[in-house]
Structure formats: structure tokens, C-alpha cells
Image (spheres, grey):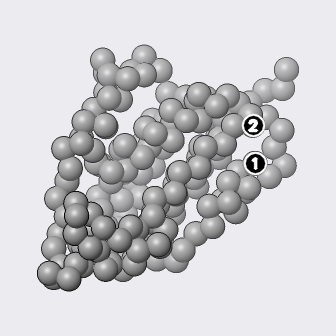
Amino acid sequence: MPSVAMTTTTIRLQVEDFDAAGEAAAITRGRTDIGAVVTFAGICRDHEGGACVRAMTLEHYAGMAEAEIASHVEEAVRRWPLVGVTVIHRHGRLVPGDNIVLVVTAAVHRGDAFAAAEFLMDYLKTRAPFWKREETPAGSSWVSAKKTDDVAAARWTRGGRDAAE
């Protein structure tokens, strides 16, 4: 049985768009030890809570955001036997239909890839230092954190979902 290679990770914060399929292909290129790749892409939508959204602006704390994301990627790698992880988060002004965030996880087995991707998204929504301002016909306003996102992230703490992993 071949040994599992070290996990390759990519973390980028950028203004530019990304190609989800290209990023997933980059993780698997030349690899035969990967049995599952899970790709999640978050996309800017044109409504939120019944309000029409014309655009959103994402701001982040440079340096701190990358470190915080890296910390959660490292935790995911400790919890699940991942072969590759890519996290790309855009910042700046985005309009409906634009890509916002990409999480790609690769593992030997699908359960590990799915769990790690969900874990990373839950933590990106609640712990990464990003701030979102939405533009609607009524004006622009900063978006508050959602209780539902905190509940989702709490599943991964000790005593929560998959805590033993």
C-alpha cells in the first residue's frame, strides 16, 4: 500500500476571480492517492433576507486573515487525513454572480473530504476576520454575524459533531 504524501495546502486572499475546476485539478494533478475531492464555492447572490443586493464589499485584516485561515486549515489536517487543501477568499467589491470563496479538500476517502470542507466553511464564516458591507436600493450597511453560523461552527468543538476526530 502506498504511503500518503504530506498534505499540500494553498491559502490565498485576492481581489481576482478564481477557477474552481482549475484549483481542484491542481490538487489532483499527478496524484494517484486521492479518492475524493470536495469543492465548495460561495457565490454572491442578489438577495439577502428579502432585500435586493446590488453588490457587497468584503474587507479583511491583512496578515491576520491569512494566519487565522491557516490555523483552521492546520486543524482540519490534524482532524482528517487530508492530502490537499485549498482555500481562496476574495475581497473587494463583488456583484451578484461573482465568486466569493473556494474551499477544496482532497482525501483518500470521501467522508474525510466532506467533513473537512464543511468544517473549514463553518469556521471561515465565523472566525476569519472579514467584514461585509451590502449595497441595496435602500443604501449600504455592514452585515452582522448570524447566530446560525455560530451554531454551525459550534458543532465542531469538543463534545460537538466529529469532535473525536
Residue occupying image coordinates x 74% and y 34%: 35
Residue occupying image coordinates x 59% and y 35%: 113
Q: Which quarter of the figure has residue 64? A: bottom left
Residue type of the residue flagged with mark 2:
Ile
Residue occupying image coordinates x 19% and y 44%: 147
User: Where residue 165 sits: x, y (%)?
Assistant: 47, 21
Judged from the image, the secondary structure of the residue bearing numbered disc 2 is loop
Relative horizontal placement of residue 81, taking residue 148 as reference (left or right):
right
Residue type of the residue flagged with mark 1:
Thr
Mark 2 near mark 1, Cβ–Cβ under 8 Å? yes
Front position in the image: 86 or 70? 86
What's the CA distance linking mark 2 and mark 1? 7 Å
Sequence order check, earlier mark of 2 and 1: 1
Q: Can residue 72 be seen?
A: yes
Per the rendering, the mark at residue 28 is 1
Q: How many marks?
A: 2
Per the rendering, the mark at residue 116 is none
Q: Can residue 78 be seen?
A: no
Relative horizontal placement of residue 1, taking residue 28 as reference (left or right):
right
95 w.r.t. 151: above or below: below
96 w.r.t. 146: above or below: below
Residue occupying image coordinates x 32% and y 22%: 160
Q: Callout 2 environment at 10 Å: few (<14), some (14 to 19), or many (20+)?
A: some
Relative horizontal placement of residue 10, taking residue 29 as reference (left or right):
left
User: Where residue 135 sits: x, y (%)?
Assistant: 24, 79
Per the rendering, the mark at residue 34 is 2
Q: Quadrant of the N terminus?
A: top right
Judged from the image, the secondary structure of the residue bearing numbered disc 1 is helix
80 w.r.t. 152: above or below: above
